[in-house]
Image (cartoon, rainbow, N blue to C red):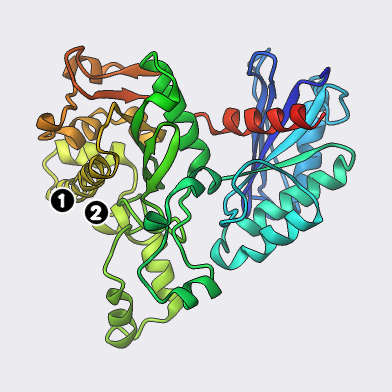
């Protein structure tokens, strides 16, 4: 296959993140971001990797079509245009693939229709993903467009983990089940952790902790997900930057009946005004740790609640897996917040994981162990690379079909 480049697009409601990769060596050729689409102060930030010189401009970008055309122009300036014969495919991050999509998929009308049917369970994400796909199709109708789904990695969960304990007919009628998210990250990190241990993914059981503003945990047995913390939506599970995570569902009824709050008000509360920001007014772990170190009791409580929930999931996934070879921390908080890693495993020494204070304090962009050599369960820090995972899956599918 002579064409070896893959353009990865992550289309949000008002933004487009992109990377162009050469799959011969998985190297990046260009990275960029278009944000505030639809505003007069839209911004495009583009960096060709070879020169490393970022180009940035602001001005009105009306919609996603205009955004992708602007991206194409920037790529063309570097000799990397969308019309290049070296471009093999465009890989699209699609947040919700439901139960149907279990692997990367060539996008056609039927696939688009199914992604659209899933909008009710992903109202913030799937519409933007669809817009990005349709715009890219219009720009390069001859090129394979590949959907890589956040939920796909979690479709290997057994029904005992995926189903909620509600009436089966109602659940099936409204597609209510646990889907999980951050799947490309969990897939990439679980494999990278196995490599770090010098083993094959099918030999290793890993608890992956994807800790960013959004946060999720997964239990991965032999390379396959058997449980994950997010559910029907990305609201379930761990305490997050602005999301509540696990909560008694009757709280919602209480807020409606006693608090006289509307459905939309409660949705906003739980998704945007809860989690760390609801507990202490900050959702940046760096600022929270600064406040903790300064003796701020509210920040300390928020941190303690965050760690308590995290530790509960680690323990739960020990029980699910039976044997754990490694705990892997990833994403913005997981990769950079040493106090979070230390606190999350503190007191679990009888189960095997131990953090070495000196190793844990070292900052690096490379996958690494932060546990001592004698630890029965390795503790790893593995920088995630969702764009590379999307490109790898998309390129493999195109090669398979050629």
Q: Is residue 290 left or right of residue 284?
A: left
Q: Give the residue drawn at x 86%, y 47%.
A: 138
Residue 334 lies left or right of residue 300; in this view the side is right
Q: Which quadrant is the C terminus positioned in?
A: top right
Q: Position of residue 314 (x, y in %)?
A: 24, 41
Q: Secondary structure at mark 2?
A: helix
Q: Which residue is mark 1?
A: 301
- Where residue 212 sits, quadrant-wise, is top left
Question: As rendered, which of 337 and 51 lies closer to the eye?
Answer: 337
The mark tally for this picture is 2
Q: Position of residue 61 (x, y in %)?
A: 74, 48
Can residue 130 be seen in the rendering of this structure? yes
Q: State the residue position of label 2.
A: 280
| Quadrant, the N terminus | top right
Secondary structure found at label 1: helix
Q: Is residue 40 above or below residue 387?
A: below
What label does residue 191 carry, if any? none
């Amino acid at each position: 296959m002579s064409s070896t480049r893959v353009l990865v697009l992550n289309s949000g409601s008002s933004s487009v993140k992109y990377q162009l990769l050469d799959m011969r060596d998985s190297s990046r050729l260009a990275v960029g971001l278009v944000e505030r689409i639809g505003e007069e102060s839209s911004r495009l930030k583009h960096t060709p990797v070879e020169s490393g010189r970022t180009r940035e401009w602001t001005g009105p970008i009306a919609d996603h079509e205009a955004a992708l055309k602007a991206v194409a122009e920037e790529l063309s300036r570097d000799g990397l245009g969308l019309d290049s014969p070296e471009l093999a495919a465009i890989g699209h991050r699609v947040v919700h693939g439901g139960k149907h999509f279990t692997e990367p998929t060539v996008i056609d009308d039927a696939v688009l229709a199914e992604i659209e049917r899933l909008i009710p369970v992903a109202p913030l994400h799937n519409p933007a993903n669809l817009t990005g796909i349709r715009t890219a199709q219009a720009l390069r109708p001859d090129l394979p467009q590949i959907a890589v789904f956040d939920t796909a990695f979690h479709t290997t969960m057994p029904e005992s983990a995926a189903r909620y304990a509600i009436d089966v007919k109602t659940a099936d009628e409204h597609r209510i089940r646990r889907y999980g998210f951050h799947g490309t990250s969990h897939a990439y990190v679980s494999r990278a952790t196995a490599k770090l241990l010098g083993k094959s993914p099918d030999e290793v059981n890993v608890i992956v902790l994807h800790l960013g503003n959004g946060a999720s945990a997964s239990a991965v047995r032999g390379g396959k997900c058997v449980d994950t913390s997010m559910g029907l939506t990305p609201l379930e599970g761990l305490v997050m930057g602005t999301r509540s995570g696990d909560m008694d569902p009757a709280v919602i009824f209480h807020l409606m009946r006693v608090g006289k709050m509307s459905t939309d008000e409660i949705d906003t509360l739980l998704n945007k005004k809860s989690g760390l920001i609801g507990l202490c007014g900050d959702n940046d772990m760096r600022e929270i740790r600064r406040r903790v170190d300064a003796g701020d009791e509210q920040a300390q409580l928020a941190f303690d609640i965050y760690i308590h929930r995290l530790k509960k999931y680690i323990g739960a996934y020990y029980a699910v897996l039976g044997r754990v070879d490694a705990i892997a921390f990833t994403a913005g908080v997981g990769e950079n917040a040493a106090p979070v890693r230390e606190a999350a495993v503190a007191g679990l020494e009888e189960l095997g994981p131990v953090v070495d204070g000196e190793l844990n304090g070292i900052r690096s962009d490379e996958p690494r162990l932060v546990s001592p050599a004698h630890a029965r369960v390795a503790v790893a820090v593995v920088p995630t690379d969702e764009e590379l995972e999307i490109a790898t899956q998309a390129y493999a599918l195109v090669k398979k079909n050629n």
